Amino acid sequence: MLKLEALTFHHSDSQGDQNYSFDLVGRAGEIVGLTGRSGSGKSTCLDLIAGFLTPVAGTVEVDGTNINARPPGQRPVTILFQNNNLFEHLGVRENVALGVNPSLKLTPAENDQVAGALSKVGLGDMLKRSAASLSGGEQQRVALARSLVANKPVLLLDEPFSALDMDTRDEMLALVRSIVTERQLICLMVTHDVRDCDAVADRRYQMIVDSGNRRVEEVLP
Amino acid sequence: MGAGVAGQRRQISPALRWVTDISWRPGVIIALGLLGLVTVVFIAILGVGSTVGSSDTSGIGQILMITFIQAGLSTVFSLIVGILLAWSLRHRQQFPGRRLLLSVLSTSMVLPTLVVALGLVDVFGRRGWWNALIDLAGPGFDLATVSIYGLGGIVLAHTYMDAPFIARGLLHRLENIPAEHFKLARGLGLTPWQRFRNVEWPALVPAIPGQCLVVFLLSFTSFAIVLMIGGSPRFNTLEVAIYEAIKLEFDLPRAVALALVQLFVCAALVLLTMSLRSGNILQAVRRPAPMWPEPRFTLIMQWLVIALFTLFFVTPLIAVTLNGVGADFVRLAGTATFRLALVSSLWLASVSALLAIALALFMASSQRHFTSRLRSKPSPMNKLYRGLLTFSGTVYLAVPALVLGLGFFLLARSFLDDLTAVAPVALIAANVMMALPFALVILTPAMGKAADKYDRLAFSLDLHGWARWRLIEWPVLRQDLGYLLALTFCLSLGDLGVIALFGGQGFATLPWLLFQHMGSYRTADAAGIALVLLTLCLAVFFIVPRLFEGRTRAET
């Protein structure tokens, strides 16, 4: 289970002091949506969970363990961004293999694991392609394959499909749904599109902005 | 607005409108004129070159080899230091004085080479600060004493001037790496080395061949540095050999033979440089990547690189300043030669800078005319015109100042008794051609972007001529123009190329006067002149761009 408890973050910008507070729960096999308008703090929430930002108070727990002190690479978390999920100068295989071993020195078994993950996302025949030659949807599939080989229980999605056309987006959402269910992942999906969220998420939280204070509230069905 | 603009346009004379249209014609005529100038110079050199058989051409192979070796070593060292510096500055984004440090490093392009050489001699010369420190440390440290004169000194000076140039270019590329890539690297647990190999190095690679070739070319045609700290004829480069053949040996055919070799090699390098222009594979940064703690060893290395290079860069400038303030400025200002050199330097640099920018504006405007589908229909002639403009804009790199000076020198000798009459023209021509590549590199893309964004709107509003310039080009270009004005002024002010051939009692500039005083061991006066040159360059480089800053910059 992913549990954010009184997770608090501050920063100051041209609009003054901004205070963020997150209380949220996600369970295995569940897709939890987080919606809100641009700049409301959705991505900040993911950055706090992934360890890119440091909270001033509160905890991030995964399966009962507080992971606040862990650096991003050692957290049980993978994340997909809207853009730039792949290193375009590397091949498809290398991009996925980074999720297994950053030195890219893979054992035969790990190579099989990479090929299996690519097959799982429907790109089994693109192992040797360069990342730059892929379409937007294919690039996101490769990134999803990398999160599969990383084998971490929490999957964070930072509007990863919003730049795709409607058909490809539906395909990707269905793929995420099946992977989350099959692997019993905890998935937190940030999006500004409530319809997308309602189509795939089991539950939804909404960012509430009250002058400089931002918090999340669960939207009841 | 359209009616108002039309009203303004009717008040402009047809001739002025033809020019202010910033259309394609003036740029093409200028490009042809520059190529014509180079051709005349080339013919003048070839004319004397036909007598080369009777001249002493011995040792030219050896000189060529030394020139290649010093330029190669200078490039390698500048690249290594430049990469380390860019990488360290990329990861140390917040420390007091970072912006000041970046500004100071950016002056490396405009520092007069002779002043840099003097500063490095003050620090690393036989009686320099470094050796004084070693003496203080005691006899056990004798091995650490250094002498700047020789190949090592030349490479050190070129690294001083070129490493910041490389670092700034590469830092820009590192800063344009998408934040998501750094987050991915962090999320995947990449070590600093793995991050460099997989994220940073691939972003740097496309820029490195082009930057290396530019630095190689600059080192290959380096004159003042080699002249000052080469130390012995063994390390003479082609440029210095040309100078010595003209001024010391009075052997014009030998100078011409050397110039032809220089021209041939530089032209080949320029063609290679033009073919290696890298496309930008990076996307613009939407927001800077956050900073995370680095491992202790990496952190220490980054701080060490920044601190050591800052010390290396700033110390010679401090030495020039401290030695210079002791000079007798009242007496110096009282000498006619100093006043002549100061006034000549200022007006030559001003005219050169304004002319270079005007020519670059017309050429950049022509270039965009032939690349914009809105402005010209696709035709094979467009490609020809574009090639002409590009080649003409980079032609200085293929014709080093001293070779250009030699051409003017030979031409003037054929028609005039008094060389000083042609000297200002030769100097301004050389300065303009030296500045043009820099000006075009900045103005061409800026004007192209302005056209992409505003052409449709401007054409629909019938906005052109002076009104277009005032409402579109000026707001978009004003900051670039301020920077370019300062850059080209400083480049012209500090150059010791053509003036080394033409300088004399009747015509002098500050770099020439400095060189004369150094040669005659009038070190106090030399230090004073160096300080005046340094102060002028830094003041112009920092103040002039500020004068061109608007409250907001027009977005392209």
Image (cartoon, helix red, strand yellow):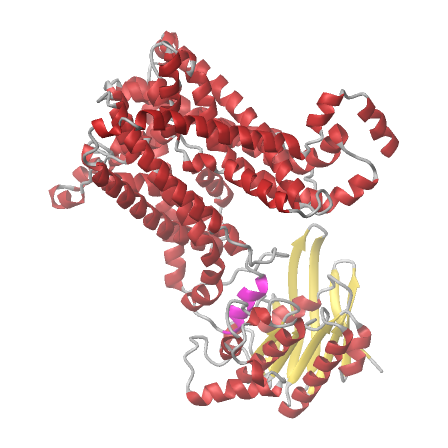
Decide if residue B122 is in sight here.
no
State the residue in front, B340 or B325: B340
What residue sits 77% from the left and 75% below the top? A166
**Residue B463 falls in image quadrant:** top right
Is B525 rendered above or below residue B131? above
Q: Is residue A75 left or right of residue B459?
A: left
Q: Quadrant of residue B505?
A: top left
**Residue B372 in the image: x percent, y percent?**
68, 45
Looking at the image, residue B434 sits to the left or right of residue B504; the answer is right
Query: In this rendering, would B510 be left or right of A216?
Result: left
**Dominant SS type (magenta):** helix
Of B144 and B492, nearer the camera is B492
Q: Residue B124's spot in the image, x, y percent?
A: 25, 36
Q: Quadrant of the N terminus of chain B?
A: top right
Read off the magenta span.
B179-188
B108 vs B452, nearest the viewer: B452
**Residue lying furthest right:** B3
* B246 inside magenta stretch: no
Residue name at image x 61 percent, y 55 percent: B284
